[in-house]
Image: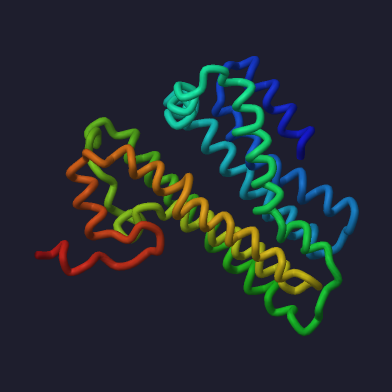
Amino acid sequence: MFVYMTFWFIIAKRRNRLDTVDAAWGGGFVLMAWLVVLQQPSVRTYMVAAMVTAWSARLTYYLAQRSRRNGEDQRYAELAKKHKHVWPWAYGGIFLLQGLIVVLVGLPIITNAGLALPDLRLFFTIGYVIWALGFYIEYKADSELRQFKANKNNTGKVLDTGLWQHSRHPNYFGELLQWWGIGLVAVQTSFGWIGLIGPVILTILIRYVSGIPTIEKRRDGDKAYQDYKQRTNPLLPWPKTIKEKI
C-alpha cells in the first residue's frame, strides 16, 4: 500500500491536483482484495474481491465524472491554502494517511482469508444481501443527486425527494451498508470478528470526521438546508417528521 499510494502521489504532483487521491482510494481496496485471492483462493475471497471491485468501479467512475464537471474538489483546495509546502505535507498527510486508512477499513478483506467456520455460514449469505442492498442504495442516491444538479432550475435548492427525503446522506448510508456486508461475510472465518473494526472505523469517519461534517459545514449559512436538517436524519433513512407537516 505504501508503494501504491506513492505511485499515486507522483501522478497527483504531475497533475497538480490533490484530489487525484480519490482515484487511488477505491483501487487500493481492489489491490488488497485480489492480493488476498492470490494468496488464499476460495469462494469467499473471490466473492469479496468481486464485491470490492464492483464497489470501486462504480465509485471511481462517479468521482471521475464529478471531477470532470466541477474541477478540483473544494475540500483539497482549502487544505492546500493552509500549508506553505503543500506537496511534502500532502505525501504524508493525505496519500500515506489514506493508505493506512485503506488497510484499516479493509481489514475484513484480509481476515476473510482465514479458516472457514461452518457454523457461521449464514453470515456469508446475510453479508452478501446487505452488500447488494447498499450497492443499490448508493447507486440510486448518486443518480438522484446527479440528475438534480444537472437541472439548472435547481440551483440554490435542496434535494429532498427520493431517497434524500429520508436521509440527508443516503449515498453514505449505502456505502456503509456495503462495508458492513463485507464485514459480516468475513465473520464466517476464524478471527473474522477482527474485520468488523474496518466498517466501525469507516462509520466513525463518515459520520463524525471527514464525511458528513465536512459537507454540512459548507452549508451553515443556507437557511433552506438548515430547515432540511431539522426534518431529516443525517444518515439512517427515516420517514419525514411530523414537524415538516406543521
Residue 68 in the image: above or below residue 127 = above
Q: Position of residue 3 (x, y in %)?
A: 79, 33
Residue lying farthest to the left in this orientation: 246
Name which quarter of the figure residue 183 lies in: bottom right
Point 39% across, 47% down: residue: 213
Q: Quadrant of the N terminus?
A: top right
Point 74% across, 80% down: residue: 120
Residue 34 in the image: above or below residue 198 = above
Q: Position of residue 117 (x, y in %)?
A: 81, 78
Side of 244 relative to 172 (left or right): left
Q: Position of residue 155 (x, y in %)?
A: 24, 33
Name which quarter of the figure residue 135 lies in: bottom right
Toward the viewer: 162 or 38?
A: 38
Residue lying farthest to the bottom in this orientation: 119
Side of 126 relative to 115 (left or right): left
Colour logic: rainbow
Q: Position of residue 144 (x, y in %)?
A: 38, 46
Point 73% across, 67% down: residue: 186
Side of 223 relative to 233 (left or right): left
Point 29% across, 46% down: residue: 159
Q: Quadrant of the C terminus?
A: bottom left
Residue lying farthest to the right in this orientation: 39
Residue 184 in the image: above or below residue 218 = below
